[in-house]
């Protein structure tokens, strides 16, 4: 992130802190493919324990975590039930189709959260001419739906129904720990109903790269085979894993600060002429707001913000998405809010 900008376009913009860089520099390393990298091994053990799973594997990206899970759980021609806004549907370049030959069966959830009844309705009948429904995917938090936190009761109901119907449940846990920070529930409580789940290191936790996929020992063994096939196996990856270990030690509790900061940002925008924002939808570190009443598209509004030193991305023709993260302070978030408000008022009055 450039020091010339307040960058709220994504929590992927974080840079390693000084302490994380020291941990990277002093990391114990070995051959990760042979199971000889002590830092990678510690990270996988740590995440498996955090998520209450038998084993875990360190991967270069969250997209690879999702798609390896799909490749292990599904066969070509299978269908996956997911919300229409899910990352695996909207933002992974069609990987489930291109790599696994799997098709999405999308449902229209309530801000990314769907019901057990919707799962039942989306399951294809057992018929030779139809794709076989194999998996249910949930995203915690539901990013493009507004950063919605899946209620534990809803997650448990969906998982119970899916399992009763013989389906696998996979959690895209890109911002799982933001959900934990926003709720009274532990990571184990959220991951418990799921057969596989992964944790992103490169978003709110502030690492430069990586995700950790967890599940049963057999699932992880199969995941390792796909990791090799997709070019995800690494050598002395301890320099990357050390960043993850540092983040788990130092950056988890502070995620609540990101959630609070984006709430303050949203409150500044609430009720401002030209801006439409629903505070009830701001549940984690993400806030969407509509600027159509200013007369500008979201992309044009974003360009004007950039000229004033604030980066917020246009996600839809009329809506922008702002995210708080490790590299922006409370003061910077408030300043960004003032700049957004100032621009909207100028446009409405002109």
Image: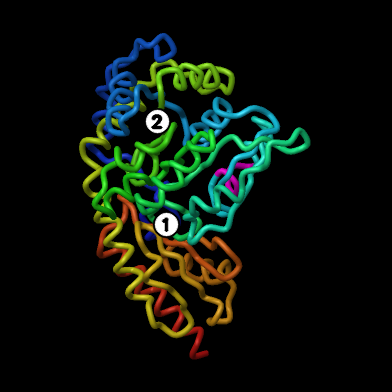
Indicate whether 88 appears above or below 272: above
Residue 107 place in picture, x, y as percent: 59, 53
Dot 2 alpha-carbon crowd within 10 angstroms: few under 14, some 14 to 19, many 20 or more: many
Residue 215 place in picture, x, y as percent: 41, 27
Dot 1 alpha-carbon crowd within 10 angstroms: few under 14, some 14 to 19, many 20 or more: many
Is residue 252 visible from the viewing direction of this image?
Answer: yes
Q: Residue at x 37, y 71 (%)?
A: 279
Q: CA distance from mark 1 to mark 2?
A: 21 Å
- Classify residue 141 as left or right of residue 317: left
Mark toward the start of the polypeptide (1 vs 2): 1
Residue 340 place in picture, x, y as percent: 41, 73
- Classify residue 55 as left or right of residue 60: left
Indicate whether 336 appears above or below 256: below
Q: Which residues are magenta?
A: 88-93
**Residue toward you, 132 or 196:** 132
Task: Indicate the quadrant where residue 160 lies.
Answer: top left
Residue picked out by circle 2: 212
Indicate whether 39 appears above or below 23: above
Indicate whether 36 appears above or below 6: above
Q: Find out whether residue 89 is within the magenta segment.
A: yes
Residue picked out by circle 1: 147
């Amino acid at each position: 992130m450039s020091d010339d900008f307040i960058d709220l376009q994504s929590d992927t913009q974080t840079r390693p802190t000084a302490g994380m860089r020291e941990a990277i520099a002093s990391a114990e390393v070995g051959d990760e493919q042979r199971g000889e990298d002590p830092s990678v091994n510690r990270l996988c053990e740590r995440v498996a324990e955090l998520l209450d799973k038998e084993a875990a594997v360190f991967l270069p990206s969250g997209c690879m975590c999702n798609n390896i899970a799909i490749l292990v759980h599904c066969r070509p021609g299978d269908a996956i039930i997911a919300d229409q806004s899910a990352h695996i549907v909207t933002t992974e370049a069609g990987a489930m189709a291109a790599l696994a030959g799997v098709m999405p069966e999308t449902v229209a959830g309530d801000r990314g959260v769907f019901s057990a009844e919707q799962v039942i309705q989306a399951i294809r009948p057992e018929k030779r001419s139809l794709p076989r429904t194999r998996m249910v995917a949930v995203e915690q938090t539901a990013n493009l739906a507004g950063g919605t936190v899946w209620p534990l009761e809803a997650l448990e109901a969906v998982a119970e129904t899916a399992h009763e119907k013989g389906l696998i449940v996979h959690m895209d846990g890109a911002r799982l720990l933001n959900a934990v920070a926003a709720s009274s529930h532990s990571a184990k409580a959220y991951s418990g109903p799921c057969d596989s789940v992964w944790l992103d290191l490169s978003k709110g936790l502030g690492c430069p790269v990586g995700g950790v996929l967890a599940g049963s020992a057999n699932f992880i063994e199969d995941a390792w085979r796909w990791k090799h096939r997709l070019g995800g196996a690494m050598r002395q990856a301890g320099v990357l894993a050390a960043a993850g270990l540092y983040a788990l030690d130092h950056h988890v509790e502070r995620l609540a600060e990101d959630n609070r900061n984006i709430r303050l940002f949203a409150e500044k925008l609430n009720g401002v002429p030209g801006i439409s924002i629903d505070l009830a939808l701001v549940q984690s570190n993400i806030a969407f707001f509509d600027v159509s009443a200013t007369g500008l598209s979201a992309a044009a509004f974003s360009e004007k913000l950039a000229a004033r030193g604030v980066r917020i991305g246009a996600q839809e023709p009329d809506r922008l998405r702002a995210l708080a993260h490790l590299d922006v302070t409370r003061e910077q978030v408030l300043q960004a809010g003032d700049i957004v408000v100032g621009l909207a008022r100028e446009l409405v009055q002109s």
